[in-house]
Image: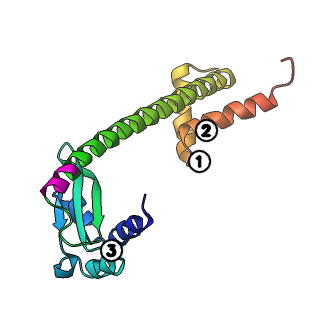
Amino acid sequence: ADVLADQLDEQQYEHGLGPCSEALLTGEVIDAPDLSLETRWNSYPVIAMGHGILAVHSVPLLVKDKPVGVLNLYADHRHAFGTRERQLAQLLAGQATIAVVAALRRYDEISLTDHLRTALASRSVIDQAIGIVMGQRRCSATEAFAMLPTISQRRHLKLRVVAADLVATTVRSTPPGA
């Protein structure tokens, strides 16, 4: 990515004002063909012009009619984005949206897989802890499981942490060959 574009984008995120921020907030295309005439966004136009940017065109990336990002085009001359450029920006934004959606789906899949892996590991440890409590207290699985949440709440720890501690303590205290 271009360093200047990153700086200008960062300026907008920091102050919440600018064509990118507005496009993200409204979901509308924001066109600023001549920053020297802009009265929107407080000092942003002056800052951009100080870096040699005289026109900005911001196209939101929409997923289910909600903006998830913005494609920003910056130009070093006024009225740089004519009909053709705006149409190309719209097409490019459409392609970027497809990439963002694919990335979000992949992230969701990875997150779900990680959560399932954690849940399965937790379930295994909890089942082991239930078995330990059953052996120590000579009680049913239901009664043993009922004891774990009580300990969890009293110690202000997650149930899986309590279960893991119980299993680890039992493994360490079991004599070899027992």
Of badges 1 and 3, nearer the viewer stands 3
Indicate whether residue 87 is drawn in magenta.
yes
Residue in the picture at 19% in, 42% down: 64
The C terminus, quarter of image: top right
Give how far across and how far down residue 119 sits, in percent: 50, 30
Give the labeled residue for mark 2: 162
Give how far across and how far down residue 21 sits, in percent: 26, 65
Per the rendering, the mark at residue 155 is: 1
Whichever of labels 1 and 3 marks the residue nearer the N terminus, that label is 3
Q: Residues within 10 Å of mark 3 (few under 14, many from 20)?
A: few
The span from disc 1 to disc 3 (Cα, nearest Å) is 43 Å
Whichever of labels 2 and 3 marks the residue nearer the N terminus, that label is 3
Residue type at mark 2: give it: Val
Circle count: 3
What kind of colouring is applied to the model shown?
A: rainbow
The local secondary structure at tag 2 comes to helix
